[in-house]
Image (spheres, grey):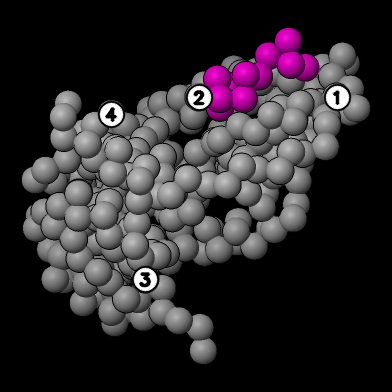
Amino acid sequence: MPPSPNVALLSSGSTRPQTIEALLSVAGFRCCVFHAGRDLIHGISHDTYDMLLIDRELPDIPAIDVIRAVRAARARDVPIVMLSEVSNDDALVEALDAGADDYLVQPMSERVLLARIAALRRRVMTTSGRIGLSVRAGPYELNSAGRYALLRGKRIAMTPKEFDLATLMFANAGCMLSNNRIERVVWGRELSPLSRALAQLVSRMRRTLALGPENGVTVSVVYAQGYRLDVLDNARADDVVTPVVPVAPRDPSQVMARHVEQLMSA
């Protein structure tokens, strides 16, 4: 019998931590509650969690900075959900840009909360199961096992959503992908028509991968419809070199400690 998924809940108290903890327990999750951002950052450097639920309002460190610190140290490994009483596009986009995988506005019914958590876990499990697959376009290679990109043999770190978007677009090079389809794949649902999250994610992916004519791969906006990735004629398949062996990952606890020191001294 597989072990129960382990969830870390970072809550200031406004998100009813006891209620959420009990709800997750009934649903078959183990839940560890933290009440300060520094405690969570320290905790995940010693224990492994399958998901993080983070309250937007924290007593010590801004939740956005906690998410960035987790992503900087643990990269893609753990899905993150922000719980918030603020319902506006700016707050949602800020959370997603920082590295959150979902943004849930409270109060929310217990059934909906559990359904959203379960849906995110299914997406993560499905994605993590695609071990050994790689997608190539021009001088680029996307490594699905490590969830990073290679550009002419040089490794490029990517956020989870950047990688999911790149994988979808590289696998459909030359085809127009509708906004709704991209949103369903990357976020698991269609976003608000007024949301800027997709446009900002595409822009960030372009910068991260240095996409452009100089590297033989471009991303274009198809007005009011979606986006298209194109591989230019001068981007030959033999531009891709044999992947380099990744360097050993840094000690997460050391990275997190540096982030906490920077955040507390700011």
Q: Which mark is residue 204?
A: 2
Dot 1 corresponds to which residue? 239
The answer to whether one can see residue 181 in this image is: no
- Going by the numbered disc 1, the residue's amino acid type is Asp
Q: Which is nearer the eye, 99 or 253?
A: 253
- Which element carries disc 1, helix, strand or loop? helix
Q: Main secondary structure of the magenta part?
A: helix
| Nearest to N terminus: mark 2 or mark 3 | 3
Dot 4 corresponds to which residue? 90
| Nearest to N terminus: mark 3 or mark 4 | 3
Residue 203 is one of the magenta-drawn residues: no
> What x and y, as percent, mark residue 142?
70, 39
174 shown above or below 258: above
Work out how far the residue at label 3 is from the one at label 4, CA to CA, in angstroms.
Answer: 30 Å
**Number of residues whose C-alpha sits closer than 10 Å to that of mark 4, classed few (under 14), some (14–19) or many (20 or more):** few
| Nearest to N terminus: mark 1 or mark 2 | 2
Q: Which residues are magenta?
A: 205-216
Pointers 1 and 2 in contact (C-beta within 8 Å): no
Dot 3 corresponds to which residue? 6
> What x and y, as percent, mark residue 109?
23, 64
Q: Which is nearer the eye, 209 or 95?
A: 209
Work out how far the residue at label 4 is from the one at label 1, CA to CA, in angstroms.
Answer: 40 Å
Q: Is residue 246 left or right of residue 119?
A: right
Pointers 4 and 2 in contact (C-beta within 8 Å): no
Work out how far the residue at label 4 is from the one at label 2, CA to CA, in angstroms.
Answer: 16 Å
- Going by the numbered disc 3, the residue's amino acid type is Asn
> What x and y, as percent, mark residue 211?
66, 19
Quadrant of res 32: bottom left
Q: Is residue 179 left or right of residue 114?
A: right
> What x and y, as percent, mark residue 185?
57, 46
Q: Which residue is found at the position 84% from the left and 19% from the top?
A: 235
